[in-house]
Amino acid sequence: MASGRAESGSSYDATLMALGQWFIERTGLRVRVASGPAELQAVQQLRRHQVDTAGWEPGSRSTAAEEADDYDHDAVHLAAWDGTELAGTARVLLPAPGVLLPTEAAFDLRFEPAGAVVECGRWVVSDGYRDGDHRVSMGLSGLACLEVVSRGYSVWGGMTTPPIIELWRGIGVQMETLAPPRTVLGEQRLAVRCDLRASLPGMISVLGPLGAPVPPDTPV
C-alpha cells in the first residue's frame, strides 16, 4: 500500500492547500489554530456543552466546565471565531509510535499505512452557527487540510456519523468505512479513512464549478 505521507512541494499538495484555504475564506470567520491556555479552555468548554446537550461521554479528565482527555495535550486544536465568540472547533492528532489514536482504540482497528494516518475529530459547532451550508464545519475542515498536508501527511481517519459521511461524499471526498458502527460519544458512529490525494479528482469535479482554485498543473 502506498505511503500516506505526501511528497513535499507536489502539485497535489498545492491543490489541497489551495482548497483548504478556499474553504476557510468562505466562512467569513477567523479560522485558525487555537493559541494559549485561554483559547484551549474555550475549546474544551464548547466541547463540554456538546457533552451536556448531545449526550457525549465525558473525557477522562473532564471537569464541571470543560471536556478534555489524554489526547488533548499533543493535539492541534482548531477554532473558528466570530469576533470573540467561538463558533466551532475540531482537533488534529498526529500518529505516534506505540500510541493508539482514539478511533483505533474505540473500534479495535489499526489505520493503514501504519504511522502515516492523522486523526481528525472532536468536531463541534456552536448552536447558533449550525446551518444547511455547514460553513463552520467546512472551514474547520479546510484548516484541518492545511495542518495535515503541511505536516507531510495526505491520509486522515476518524469516527463520524452516516449523514456526515454522505455530506463529504457529496463534495467528491472518498470516505472508506473500516468497521461496523459502534456507539461512541453517545451516538452510533463509523470508523472512516480518507485519502486526500485520491479524493482530489472527485473534489475538483464538484467544487470547480463553484470557483474553487485548481492550479493548472494539478495531475488529476
Image (cartoon, grey):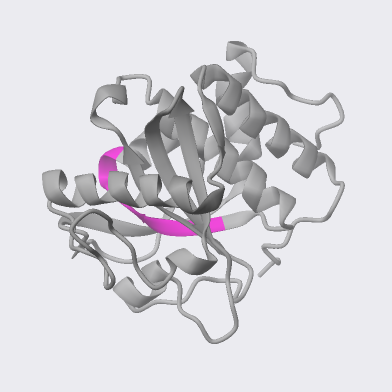
The picture quadrant where one finds residue 219 is: top right
Farthest-out residue, front: 38
User: Height in image: 47 above or below 74?
Assistant: above
- Residue beneath the point at 71% across and 21% down: 213
Using the rendered image of the protein, determine whether residue 198 is visible from the camera's viewpoint: no
- Residue beneath the point at 83% across and 40% down: 11
Say if the magenta span includes residue 110. Answer: no
Quick one: 111 or 198, which is closer to the camera?
111
Left or right of 203? Residue 105 is left
Say if the magenta span includes residue 159. Answer: yes
User: Height in image: 173 above or below 211?
Assistant: below
In the rendered image, residue 218, in percent from the top left (x then y), is placed at 81, 33
In the rendered image, residue 109, in percent from the top left (x then y), is placed at 40, 76
User: Height in image: 68 above or below 112?
Assistant: above
Q: Mainly helix, strand or loop, the magenta region?
A: strand
The picture quadrant where one finds residue 112 is: bottom right
- Residue beneath the point at 58% across and 65% down: 94
- Residue beneath the point at 48% across and 59% down: 157
Q: Where does the magenta region start and end?
A: 156-163
Left or right of 184? Residue 19 is right
